[in-house]
Image (cartoon, grey):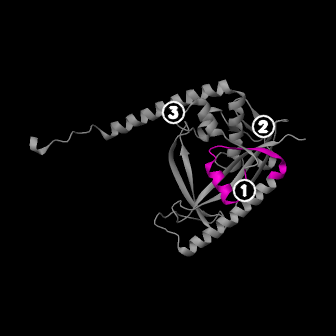
Amino acid sequence: MTTPLTAYIDMEFAGIYGTHQRMQIPIEIGVVLHNPETDALSFAGKPFRADVEVELWKNILNDLGKRVDSRRRVFNLADTVRTQQFDHRFHLSPAGARKARTAIAAVNADLRLFMQALNSRNIGTLVFFARQREMVAFRQARVRTDGFLTRDIQQEIAHEMQLKEQISLDRMSLIIKFGITSNSIKSANLSFTIPPQYQYVIKPHKAIGDAARMFLVDMEFRQYLTETRAGIKDHLLQYEKARAAERTQIDEERGPVQDEQDPNML
């Protein structure tokens, strides 16, 4: 009997334009399949297409993985070159909302078919990083996960390290020294070959790229625990120092706060 595979799964989402993030739609899924017996990797992914305008946020990060700015773009999910300027005053009409619900239903059907095909690969474990949104999407698409062992790397790291706050995938990627070459993904201690057809789509903040980052974070944390724990502690120290310096700078820019005086005391 073959060894069950472990599937590292990431999904990217976007808000339906004009709903102010109240309606969300999956826009792509990426999967890294790991065979624990042979240590071999395989990859799968799918962009979702539907005739609906979505707004996607792109975070701008500093060298510690902290978000310092964000950018937003609006495009059609069926034809991504059809873009437009974001207008915060725009509200989706009732007809537009019906069209959006039809698009979401179509994407959910595609997601269900993708996961059914993936399940033929003899998967035993589903691994996520902050799995809440993916699990909601699976429920809405009627994808059953109760037959699998499910894990959340972010929660496991927080529990092991006794963290007060969850640590992001961007920050963990910095800690393990995640990198991409022309033919491989790598971290501080590990390297895996990328199939040629995936060499240009594996990148951070794309579903299959984030699934690859999740895989290497998990491997580093489990196989090189002492080294990774030390890296997390050092990163948290530097992160807190940067936050303290930022607060100090803001206070200095605001200047001293003058005490309000009671006019009756003048």
Find residue 175 and report its horizontal and vertical position in percent.
Answer: 62, 32
Mark number displayed over residue 171: none
Find residue 97 and report its horizontal and vertical position in percent.
Answer: 57, 70
Q: Amino acid type of disc 2?
A: Phe
Residue identified by numbered label 2 = 192
Q: Amino acid type of disc 3?
A: Tyr
Find residue 39 and report its horizontal and vertical position in percent.
Answer: 82, 36
Q: Residue at x 67, y 66 (%)?
A: 105
Q: Secondary structure at mark 2?
A: strand
Q: Which residue sits furthest right?
A: 1
Q: Which residue sits furthest bottom?
A: 95
Find residue 252 and report its horizontal and vertical position in percent.
Answer: 33, 36
**Residue 98 part of the magenta-drawn span:** no
Callout 2: few (<14), some (14-19), or many (20+) C-alpha neighbours within 10 Å?
some
Residue identified by numbered label 1 = 143
263 left or right of 178 in image: left
